[in-house]
Image (cartoon, helix red, strand yellow):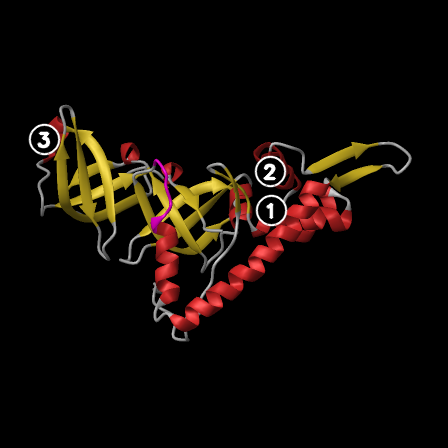
Amino acid sequence: MNDSTSPPSGPLALGGSVWFQAGQQTLGGAARIALLAAIRDTGSITGAAKAVGMSYKGAWDAIDAMNNLAGEPLVVRSTGGKGGGGTTLTPRAIRLIDTFHAIEREHRRFLERAGAAIDGFGGDWALLGRIGLRMSARNQLYGTVVSVVRGAVNDEVSIALPGGHTIVAVVTCESTETLGLAPGSAALALVKASSVVLVAGDGVPMRLSARNQLQGVVGVIRRGAVNAEVAVELPGGAVIVGVVTDGSVDALGLAVGQPATAVFKASSVILGVSG
């Protein structure tokens, strides 16, 4: 098995991305702005979606989201008429494209200056971005996509963690496309603590329908009135947390320092990417 999480042999390059927000919601990043620009250039949703490598439905979903988050139309579709109909951008959308590109240029210059001035800035900048994410899922595991098995409706995406474990997620084909998931790309796997089943011991992989079985050692047990939060430390430093009853902790003999396996279904994994 290849270790896809090994550091590259070449020099590290500094990267980053820009996106617009409306309140706490992301209005759009480079992919959505590229879609707007393609609509401007082609006057067609079909042509724009093809130009940016997006499905027709995915393009309209993105447009609907942008229209809603902007609080006003950015894309307007007309049908019939002398010109045969088509798709156009509002003046606000055209300004948004220009503004994004201007900010992106300044952002790139900032990263170039920072990368030259601060030792190790590239790795720290990426880590700060991940730390700054706020979400309800208790478990946030960062890794690298190692394979994507395509299906008619859903795809199976495997994410390698730094310690050697691999997480499998089942997502829609559209999500794979929209997120740009491909071998070698970075991804964040989100799993709610309530979706994690804990098994005592470190035996061989069990015959279960759940695809993900991550073996580690119990690091912390936080008991409550009814439930307990159990943190399992994985090789490589990652931690995955499960919520079980206090009775289950006692029945399983879970204790700090003892081996345990965190089990969860591939359908319980949500994948995210930055930018």
State the image coordinates of residue 49 (x, y, percent, origin top left): 67, 46
Instruction: Tell me the residue at 75%/51% (across/down).
Output: 41
The front one of 44 and 252 is 44
> Which of pointers 2 and 3 indicates the residue nearer the eye?
2
What is the x, y in percent for residue 107?
Answer: 52, 60
Whether residue 264 is visible, yes or no, is yes
Q: Are the residues tagged 2 and 1 within 8 Å (C-beta)?
A: yes
State the SS at label 2.
helix
Identify the magenta region. 131-136
Which residue carries the number 1 mark?
A: 32
Instruction: Give the CA separation, mark 2 to mark 3.
Output: 50 Å
Q: Is residue 7 magenta?
A: no
**Cα–Cα gap, marks 2 and 1:** 8 Å
Q: Rounded to the nearest whole Å, what is the CA distance between mark 3 and mark 1?
A: 51 Å
**Horizontal placement of 73 versus 17: left or right?**
right
Q: According to the image, label 3 marks what residue?
A: 251
Could you tell me which residue is drawn at 49 percent across and 36 percent down? Answer: 23
What amino acid type should be assigned to the residue bearing mark 1? Arg
Inspect the image, locate mark 3, and give the three-letter code of the amino acid beneath it: Ala
For label 2, count other residues whose C-alpha is less than 10 Å away and answer few (under 14), some (14-19) or many (20+).
many
Decide if residue 206 is in sight here. Answer: no
Q: Rate crowding at label 3 as few (under 14), some (14 to 19) or many (20 or more) other CA atoms within 10 Å.
A: few
Counting from the top left corner in percent of width and height, residue 172 is at: 51, 40
Considering the whole magenta stretch, tell me its main secondary structure.
loop
User: Which residue was labeled with disc 2?
Assistant: 66
